[in-house]
Amino acid sequence: MRRILSIFVFTVLLCNFLEGQNKQILYDFNEIPQSLMVNPGVESDFKWYSGIPMISGVSAYAGSNGVSVNDIFAEDGLDINDKVRDRMVYGMGRRDEFSGNVQLELVNIGFRSGNPNLFYSGGAYLELDNITYWPRDYARLVFDGNADQLNRRFDLGDLKTRGSLVAVYHLGVNKKVNKNLTIGARGKLYSGIVDYNSTRNSGYLVNTEGQNNILNTTLSADLSWSTSGFGQLDEASDNGTTGNTIMKRALFGGDLGLGMDLGFSYRLNDQTVFTASVLDLGFIYHSGDTYNYSLSGTASSEGIQINVLRELSNLNRDYWQDLVDEIEELVPFEESNSAYLTFRPTKVNASLRYDFGKPTGSSEDCDCTIQVSGSNEPRMAFRNSVGGHLFLINRPRGPQAAITGFYMRRFGNVLALKATYTADKFSYTNLGFGINLQAGPINLYAMADNLLSYGNIAASNYASFQLGLNIISWGRK
């Protein structure tokens, strides 16, 4: 029970602690070193950079597309039970979700090698991620019961949830192949701290007319729930060593996995750039401190049936326990400590950018920026950019997509601004804004999404932010 409570608290914290899986403002914002984290093949001019530990990259998001806090708790004179029934129990579908993600960079550094066409980067970060789909039929079963639901099947497959806390160690390389093409790859080593997963459930519960009783109840279930790391955290909380346990599991003492990122940027001409990336193509093998729970089988029952004449001499018998034992034999609940495998939520980005306006950059005759990686090949840095960005992420109920249009304005090498409009399942009115400030070697950036909701954040279905502080050497010639 304590382990289940720990998982519940962990889920609530994830859903209420704001990082954006979709970093549409940061994507292709190549003045910022962290843009390498969303596309290892981004065009970059850095000679070297170093993120300020713990504050170089902080980002968070929380979203619920089916209901907002304000929908339930607003002081509108309506009974809260009615609002829960109308807006959640009967207002939300099985594809509606509660999700949250947080990333905190611990270390992030990068440097250009002796070969000016190669740029290396690496570091470590913590990532929390959760998604829980609304268990529609479970909610209706709990809220209304099944006594008056003759012939209605409650779908047990509505239960889909997963979440994790992972330490990620990464090393990437960015290579300029020629003036038009830049490619990149990043290897990742995952050290799982905690994990829970219940995404492959099926079955039903249904009442039909009985032959020997009023109702016949049938349960057909194939349910599973797997966890890792929570047992050690429970013990650590009793001993006052929670911090040490988390640190140990983060430093390769937990579940291990491998992954990779791939990306590229290709110039169709001097003013048009196409980019794409695939992130977190990887897995984690959970083998330590695992607990697996399953319920599988089919049983039908018309309740307790007693033949008084036949059982007259044995009325002290525990008929209820006999019924429970019979059902448990047909639909056994089992526990195990076997290892299991999870795949990371793979993400895909693609963008098309058009640069225009007066070029900005150096005082060269061409009024352009000379790349340190370019062997004196100039790359035009225009003041304005417009374009579109497509984002896809793999989810338990299938891929989710978001599409973004953006405008970017550069003011020399000191200031860059980016405005975005994004449409996804959470909102069709998502306006975002990002700012990047370069004060000598100090780089400061901040970004926020869904700005129209900030007047009443409780009524919003989605909110996110990103910010960071770096030291950069551009090394321009």
Image: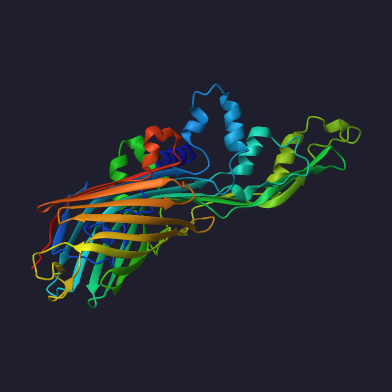
Q: Is residue 251 visible?
A: no
Q: Which of the two residues, 128 or 45, is positioned nearer the viewer here?
A: 45
Residue at (87% x, 43% y) in the render: 211
Position of residue 65 measured from the top left corner of the image (x, y, whole percent): 50, 44
State the residue at coordinates (83%, 42%).
209
Which residue is outermost to the right? 309
Quarter occupied by the C terminus: bottom left
Would residue 279 be found to the left or right of residue 199 on screen?
left
Q: Residue at x 58, y 44 (%)?
A: 135
Give the x, y percent position of residue 155. 66, 48
**Percent of width and height locating residue 323:** 74, 40
> What's the image's color scheme?
rainbow
Which of 103/214 is in front?
103
11 or 420: nearer the viewer: 420
Looking at the image, residue 167 sits to the left or right of residue 297; the answer is: left
Residue farthest toward the front in the current orientation of the protein: 357
Is 404 situated left or right of 58 in this image?
Answer: right
Can residue 208 be seen by looking at this rendering? yes
| Residue depicted at 49% across the width and 40% down the height | 4
Query: Horizontal and vertical percent for residue 147?
Result: 75, 35
Report which quarter residue 368 is drawn in. bottom left
Left or right position of 464 against 411: right
Residue that sits furthest to the bottom in the current view: 178
Location of residue 472 with respect to 247 vertically, above or below: below
